Image (cartoon, rainbow, N blue to C red):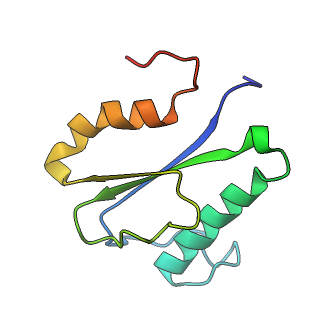
Amino acid sequence: RPDARRVVIVATDGQPNRITGCVANGFGRDPVRCTKSAAGLLKSRGTEDLGDDVVFVYLRIGTGASPTLFKEVEDYRINVVFSQLQQARDTILRAVACPNDKTP
């Protein structure tokens, strides 16, 4: 839909389990730097048209991931422990819903 929001949700516990495409996309081998670079690129693509900005949600699971990992690009940060992921669903939906949409 042309009026749909572009949403990116990065969920991490801070423990990278694989690095796919980082080097091929010019982001290097460091998983944290790769993720931050990719996130910055996604956000910058929306800056030409502010109505097309990406909504960036940082879903921080546990305490292993830095709370400031995406401070330059995040619109929302949701902190949960693994056992709370199901309950976090409604918070995530409210964060990313279009202003005129109703969330379940």
Residue 37: where, in percent of width, then height?
62, 72
Q: Residue at x 23, y 36 (%)?
A: 86
Above or below — where is 60 with respect to 8?
below
At x 70%, y 78%, the residue is 26
Query: What residue sits 50% from the left and 67% below the top?
Result: 71
Extreme residue toward the left, this view:
83
Which residue shows up at 72% across the image and 22% down it?
1
Counting the numbered discs, the total is 0
Q: Percent position (x, y) of residue 56?
A: 55, 50
Name the spot of residue 85 as percent of width and height, x first: 24, 43
Q: Is residue 14 left or right of residue 29?
A: left
Classify the position of the C terminus by image quarter: top left
Of residues 38 and 97, the one drawn nearer to the viewer in this rendering: 97
Q: Is residue 100 left or right of residue 84?
A: right
The quadrant in which residue 44 appears is bottom right
On screen, residue 100 above or below 82 = above
Quarter assignment of residue 7: top right
- Comparing 18 with 42, the one in front is 42
Query: Which residue is situated farthest in the bottom direction here?
Result: 29
